[in-house]
Image (tube, rainbow, N blue to C red):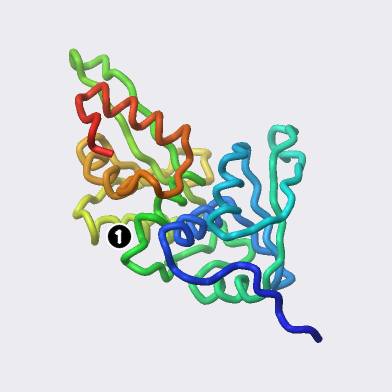
Amino acid sequence: MGKPQHKVRIKWSPEFSYAIGLLTTDGNLSSDGRHFDFTSQDPEQIKNLMRCLGIKNKIGKKISGQTKRRIARVQFGDVNFYRFLLTIGLMPNKSKILTSLDIPDKYFFDFLRGHFDGDGTFYSYWDPRWKSSFMFYVEFIGSSKKHIEWLRDKINQFLTIKGHITKGAGHSCYQLKYAKSESLKLLPKLYHKESFPRLSRKYLKIKETLAIIGKRGLI
């Protein structure tokens, strides 16, 4: 047998940690112990992953099982990187069984930004119950309750904010939500340096919201 191919440089950094966050949410580890599949409706997401991991593979297309639309994907193989991901807690068919991950504290919020860009959402609205009351939420989504609870515990460890976990009737995913006051503590940590990788459309949406409440320079 030949030597395992080493394509991805395994060294913790803001970019590497961000990519791990993306793979945690939108990545798929094949059961063959070598291959990865990363699919996204946003081409920028795939380009960010490839740039952060130094992947040069061609971006392809696949048919989405839910929408039947053609969406972008990248596939690559790297035995060494695959084995590394197993050691930090990722695995094939991870969605419902994922628990904690071994992420260095120094890079946790870079990982979390990737997680947020992959399976998170940000929304805002004017609350009709109170005049001039503008509300917004940062939300992380996942199929594994244990993983979502781990995220909440880690964020609370760093920022002393608790959020709240919900699971609506008929929904298969859990939502970890941070309301306005806690989001104002979380967002500067997620976007702690402007040059670090991020999904542009989510970042701009958040910037616009912060401008509405007079927090333009927060991130």
Residue 162: where, in percent of width, then height?
Answer: 24, 51
In the rendered structure, which amino acid carries the disc numbered 1?
Asp
Circle 1 SS class: helix
Residue 68: where, in percent of width, then height?
Answer: 75, 33
Observer-nearest of 100 and 170:
100
- Residue 204 visible here: yes
Q: Is residue 18 found left or right of 43 in the rendered image?
A: left
Considering the image in quadrants, where does the N terminus appear? bottom right
Q: Residue furthest right?
A: 1
Residue visible at 30% across and 30% down? 136
Residue 140: where, in percent of width, then height?
Answer: 41, 46
Residue visible at 21% across and 54% down? 159
Observer-nearest of 96 and 53:
53
| Residue pointed to by mark 1 | 153
Q: Is residue 34 above or below residue 109?
A: below
Residue visible at 62% across and 71% down? 82
Q: Is residue 206 above or below residue 105?
A: above
Q: Is residue 36 found left or right of 158 in the rendered image?
A: right
Considering the image in quadrants, where does the C terminus appear? top left
Q: Is residue 67 above or below residue 90?
A: above
Residue visible at 23% across and 39% down? 184
Residue 119: where, in percent of width, then height?
Answer: 49, 45
- Residue 174 visible here: no
Q: How many marks?
A: 1
Q: Is residue 86 above or below residue 68?
A: below
Q: Is residue 155 found left or right of 49 in the rendered image?
A: left
